[in-house]
């Protein structure tokens, strides 16, 4: 068999679907998995009859690839990536290129780019979003590393990526670990939107007394609007309509209220804290997952900590899409995107990534988990002002805030009186109210810091740093 255009290491679901995607787009492939039985199973199953060959070991794998070699690693982040790099490096030659398509921490990618480029190998850290279906049919891909390395894979990834009206959902992100950083922020935004939609569901169920089909109808209405039409709203409707095959009850109500996480949401929040970016909606979503894991404690606390009974308040009617609740959903989703974009803007300056915000919005319009009609508005906002400090002050988004803020406030207030936690919605309200306030009470905080620690302060009426000997 002739030598292959493309190599894949790691035959998990994502890896299998990505290599099938590449083969469908005209790239012959060779695959390797640590356990050869998995390779045999794939070649006899989904890979049967396709221009894909297997390899028994890494030396065999490398020998079956055309020069220069293009190798995608789909293995668990962290030490396994370093192990594969160490094991395969002796068989690589100048100009060969490794691509890490997992959810690696971007500092690890920075290190790997530097190490491998020093050996004349190329290295790309590439975020891939879209789940198993996206990997097969066309994901959104976020490759970072040297421009020369990206140029070497551009013909491959532009064919494999999801396609939208203005091009493929892949672009060169920037140097070093920028690709994996952008994917991390993508996942942070995803955390936010998932929690926001869950809070809307909880309010409709516990305050509105609605069943799965009734709530699904509301999500279907939301998915018909410019502001909320998105993949996540679409699949929320699907989840709420799905019935338990055992008895026909709403299946979602049989699922334990414990959400997992793989670390990217945490990395988003930690990066934001280190860089001084405000991401309270995303942080609230992360904390929501942490609280959900404390199931045993919550069950016991429910017996001793009393709050108000869930009492009805005006969230709107299903006939009008529950207008106040929709206001809350829209602004919280906008805040999640705004906070992610602001974090990327700050990181771009700090790490010299030179991120192109309109391009990032464009490649998120298809294939990825956070794809939404709203991304066209985000793309337009950053095209109009590439230095836009915050999405909220773009004219279109500012109008959304001004029109919908009363609805968000009504929902948060009603939820508080009903004793129902809405961490993302309440954090969004605080975020917007803080951002639109010209003078915050931190003048008193700074006075206290100077009082106990002589940290000095600035004045509003004259320049300089000042210290006061405060009276006890």
Image (cartoon, grey):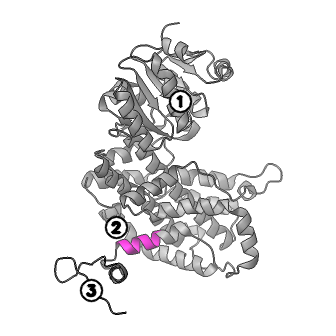
Q: Which mark is residue 83?
A: 1
Q: Main secondary structure of the magenta part?
A: helix
Which secondary structure, mark 3?
loop
Residue 364 seen anywhere in this rendered image of the structure: no
The residue lying toward the viewer, choosing from 440 and 211, is 440
Q: Which mark is residue 398?
A: 2
- In this rendering, the answer to whether 345 lies above or below 111 is below
Q: What residue does disc 3 label?
A: 468
Q: Quadrant of residue 286?
A: bottom right
As drawn, the residue found furthest toward the left would be 462
Upstream in the sequence, badge 3 or badge 2?
2
Residue 305, position in %: x, y?
Answer: 70, 79
Point 52% across, 27% down: residue? 84
Horizontally, is 256 left or right of 420 in the view? Answer: right
Upstream in the sequence, badge 2 or badge 1?
1
Give the magenta-colored segment's residue range: 428-435
The residue lying toward the viewer, choosing from 335 and 460, is 460
């Amino acid at each position: 068999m002739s030598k292959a255009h493309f190599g894949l290491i790691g035959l998990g679901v994502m890896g299998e679907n990505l290599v099938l995607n590449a083969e469908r787009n005209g790239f012959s492939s060779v695959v390797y998995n640590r356990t050869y039985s998995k390779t045999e199973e794939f070649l006899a199953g989904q890979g049967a009859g396709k221009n894909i060959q297997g390899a028994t070991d890494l030396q065999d794998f490398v020998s079956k690839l055309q020069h220069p070699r293009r190798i995608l690693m789909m293995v668990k982040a962290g030490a396994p990536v370093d192990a594969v790099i160490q094991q395969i490096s002796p068989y690589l030659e100048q100009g060969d290129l490794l691509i890490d398509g997992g959810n690696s921490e971007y500092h690890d990618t920075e290190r790997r780019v530097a190490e491998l480029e020093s050996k004349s190998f190329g290295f790309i850290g590439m975020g891939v979003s879209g789940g198993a279906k996206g990997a097969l049919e066309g994901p959104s891909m976020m490759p970072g590393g040297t421009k020369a390395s990206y140029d070497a894979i551009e013909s491959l990834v532009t064919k494999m990526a999801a396609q939208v009206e203005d091009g493929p959902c892949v672009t060169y992100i920037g140097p070093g670990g920028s690709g994996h950083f952008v994917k991390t922020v993508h996942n942070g935004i995803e955390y936010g939107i998932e929690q926001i939609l869950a809070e809307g569901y909880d309010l409709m169920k516990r305050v509105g007394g609605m069943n799965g089909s009734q709530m699904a109808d509301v999500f279907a209405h939301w998915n018909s609007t410019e502001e909320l039409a998105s993949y996540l709203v679409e699949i929320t409707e699907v989840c709420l309509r799905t019935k338990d095959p055992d008895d026909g009850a709403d299946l979602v109500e049989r699922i334990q209220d414990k959400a997992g996480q793989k670390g990217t949401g945490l990395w988003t929040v930690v990066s934001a804290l280190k860089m001084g970016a405000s991401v309270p909606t995303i942080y609230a979503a992360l904390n929501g997952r942490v609280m959900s894991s404390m199931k045993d404690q919550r069950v016991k606390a429910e017996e001793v900590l009393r709050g108000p009974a869930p009492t009805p308040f005006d969230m709107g009617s299903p006939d009008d899409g529950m207008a106040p609740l929709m206001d809350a959903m829209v602004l919280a989703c906008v805040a999640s995107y705004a906070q992610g974009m602001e974090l990327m803007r700050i990181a771009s300056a700090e790490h010299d990534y030179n991120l192109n915000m309109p391009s990032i919005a464009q490649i998120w319009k298809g294939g990825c988990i956070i794809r939404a009609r709203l991304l066209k508005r985000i793309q337009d906002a950053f095209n109009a002002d590439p230095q836009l400090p915050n999405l909220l002050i773009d004219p279109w988004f500012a109008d959304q805030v001004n029109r919908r803020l009363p609805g968000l406030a009504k929902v948060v207030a009603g939820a508080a009186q009903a004793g129902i936690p809405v961490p993302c919605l309440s954090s969004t309200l605080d975020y917007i109210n803080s951002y639109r306030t010209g003078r915050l009470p931190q003048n008193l905080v700074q006075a206290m810091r100077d009082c106990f620690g002589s940290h000095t302060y600035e004045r509003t009426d004259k320049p300089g740093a000042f210290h006061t000997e405060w009276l006890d």
